[in-house]
Image (tube, helix red, strand yellow):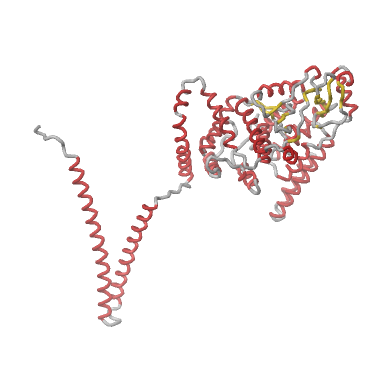
């Protein structure tokens, strides 16, 4: 499959010299769709890691064409289940007892089938309803082979494409490898679930399943069964009367809290892992893929958010550099001008992402990203995937979601926690009201400086000053025109002296001379008026600066 894709792209690249641009674009889109469908079918047949890879890639809506995304998104749910007899053998071997001895009831039909395992509903002998997650038999051997195939693919991408110019492929591979290997240990997943339980103990709008450790091993995970439907099942949410605007706000708060406050986030929040219960409570499940954010990275993320709010392109570039999102030797001046133009799309204090996520703007954004000195550093691939997925779910629930208003309290909490206990905390409290007045002015000042730097500054004059300037310009223009008319009349009279009646030339020349002398007189009178004003001003200043006491005194 990999070599077939490489050949197809090579051959398409040769055709661009022989076919029109519009036809080449159509052939390119058709090839994207064909290859994505081929990848999906191959993944379904082979199973293992290639499905997980396709699911991960399908979330890269900011880089990949829509034709690829549409096909790969089918991998989120369309995974065939394993025969129950194999699952039963796996459970009994792992738990050391027969299913009938452990469970009062056990459903042979899975309620969910994923790339690495599948989930069955059951009831313990003690009466608790549970979900039993079982790793697919033989999946470890398949994944070992898949890792080698992916390494071959990365070598081809680094050699034959420009992808390595904006993405550290080796670091992405390492991150993907570490995350998937953790997902193969269900005991680690259980520990992750309990960490999330503690993280959300103060919230009543989100639940995490409890873990039954007595019936859990590295290959079998038994947890509390939570009722619910996928968060994108809008018909059922409407039938239950769930407030989708409130639901979207809760979801974005949950993930902002994970990222900015805790630094520990759910890395695979697709609709199948984010359920909604009849009362509107969010049920998070499947904690095999998680991510952690270092404290220094959180600080720079907050700095980046503040720079976006202030439309401070240079501040944003500094934060992106510290986050290692920018390549070395990039033209940061050009990038700063482009970023300033991008910030102009932000109106007021709201950040509407629809201008980059709708229609043709997606292609323009992709071109912008490719043309800028971006790179995807290590430990951010899954973070970007999670943020993009959650934002898509939230806008599906509430297209008018106030992203800035929802995120702002958590940014403030991070800032306060950084300053808490320091000598600056009192200053921050005392200056809170002052900052409310300063920030809007600072934002306008920074925006003006960036416009001056990029050559796009426009000055708007007051109406009174503008009218006065126009009147002065009109008077000067009239004087120039009158002087030109007078000069032309005088020269015409001189040239026509011998051609026509002398009286006509005399009258025309006199008229021209009078017009020119009158303009000189007006100019001299205005100069006298200005001189008189200056003398009055000097006398007034001299009177004000006169000593109050006599020198003899």
Residue at horizontal 84 percent and vertical 23 percent from the top: 123
User: Where is residue 438 drawn, in percent x and y?
Assistant: 45, 35
Q: Quadrant of the image for the N terminus?
A: top right
Q: Is residue 155 visible?
A: no
Q: Is residue 42 visible?
A: yes
Number of disc labels: 0
User: Where is residue 310 drawn, in percent x and y?
Assistant: 51, 37
User: Where is residue 297 drawn, in percent x and y?
Assistant: 59, 27
Front one among 129 and 390? 129
Residue that protrudes farthest toward the right in the picture: 85
Within the image, what quadrant is residue 295 found in?
A: top right
Front one among 487 and 292? 292
User: Where is residue 136 drawn, in percent x and y?
Assistant: 83, 27
Residue at horizontal 30 percent and vertical 72 percent from the top: 489
Front one among 326 and 196? 196
Within the image, what quadrant is residue 188 found in?
A: top right
Within the image, what quadrant is residue 506 found in?
A: bottom left
Q: Quadrant of the image for the C terminus?
A: top left
Q: Is residue 383 left or right of residue 503?
A: right
Front one among 328 and 181? 181
Q: Is residue 112 left or right of residue 89?
A: left
Residue that protrudes farthest toward the left in the picture: 552
Q: Is residue 224 left or right of residue 164?
A: right
């Amino acid at each position: 499959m990999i070599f077939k894709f490489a050949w197809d792209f090579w051959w398409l690249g040769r055709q661009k010299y022989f076919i029109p641009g519009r036809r080449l674009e159509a052939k390119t889109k058709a090839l994207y769709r064909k290859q994505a469908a081929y990848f999906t079918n191959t993944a379904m047949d082979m199973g293992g890691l290639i499905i997980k890879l396709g699911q991960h890639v399908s979330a890269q809506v900011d880089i990949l064409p829509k034709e690829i995304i549409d096909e790969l998104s089918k991998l989120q749910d369309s995974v065939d289940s394993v025969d129950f007899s194999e699952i039963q053998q796996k459970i009994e071997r792992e738990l050391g007892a027969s299913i009938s001895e452990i469970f009062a009831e056990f459903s042979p039909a899975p309620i969910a089938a994923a790339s690495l395992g599948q989930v069955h509903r059951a009831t313990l002998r003690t009466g608790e309803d549970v979900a039993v997650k079982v790793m697919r038999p033989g999946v470890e051997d398949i994944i070992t082979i898949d890792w080698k195939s992916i390494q071959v693919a990365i070598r081809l991408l680094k050699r034959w494409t420009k992808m390595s110019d904006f993405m550290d492929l080796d670091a992405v591979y390492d991150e993907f490898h570490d995350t998937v290997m953790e997902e193969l240990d269900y005991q680690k997943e259980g520990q992750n679930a309990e960490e999330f339980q503690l993280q959300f103990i103060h919230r009543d709008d989100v639940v995490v399943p409890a873990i039954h450790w007595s019936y859990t091993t590295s290959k079998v995970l038994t947890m509390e069964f939570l009722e619910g439907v996928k968060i994108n099942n809008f018909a059922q949410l409407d039938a239950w009367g769930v407030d989708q605007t409130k639901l979207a706000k809760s979801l974005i708060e949950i993930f902002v809290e994970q990222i900015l406050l805790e630094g520990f986030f759910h890395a695979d929040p697709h609709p199948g892992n984010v359920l909604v219960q009849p009362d509107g409570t969010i049920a998070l499940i499947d904690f095999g893929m998680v991510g952690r954010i270092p404290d220094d990275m959180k600080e720079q993320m907050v700095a980046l958010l503040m720079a976006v709010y202030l439309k401070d392109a240079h501040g944003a570039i500094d934060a992106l550099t510290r986050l290692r999102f920018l390549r070395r030797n990039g033209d940061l001046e050009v990038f700063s001008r482009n970023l300033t133009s991008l910030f102009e799309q932000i109106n007021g204090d709201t950040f509407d992402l629809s201008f980059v996520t709708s229609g043709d703007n997606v292609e323009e954004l992709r071109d912008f990203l490719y043309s800028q000195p971006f790179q995807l550093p290590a430990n951010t691939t899954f973070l970007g995937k999670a943020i993009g997925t959650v934002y898509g779910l939230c806008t599906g629930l509430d297209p008018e979601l106030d992203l800035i208003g929802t995120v702002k309290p958590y940014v403030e909490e991070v800032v306060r926690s950084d300053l808490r206990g320091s000598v600056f905390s009192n200053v921050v409290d005392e200056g809170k009201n002052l900052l409310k007045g300063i920030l809007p002015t600072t934002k306008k000042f920074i925006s003006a400086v960036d416009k001056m730097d990029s050559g796009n500054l426009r000055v708007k004059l007051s109406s009174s000053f503008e009218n006065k300037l126009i009147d002065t310009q009109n008077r000067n223009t009239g004087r120039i025109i009158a002087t030109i008319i007078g000069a032309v009349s005088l020269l015409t009279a001189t040239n026509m002296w011998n051609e026509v009646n002398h009286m006509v030339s005399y009258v025309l020349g006199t008229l021209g001379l009078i017009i020119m002398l009158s303009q000189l007189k007006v100019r001299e009178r205005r100069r006298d008026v200005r001189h008189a004003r200056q003398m009055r001003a000097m006398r007034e200043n001299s009177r004000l600066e006169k000593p109050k006491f006599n020198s003899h005194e």
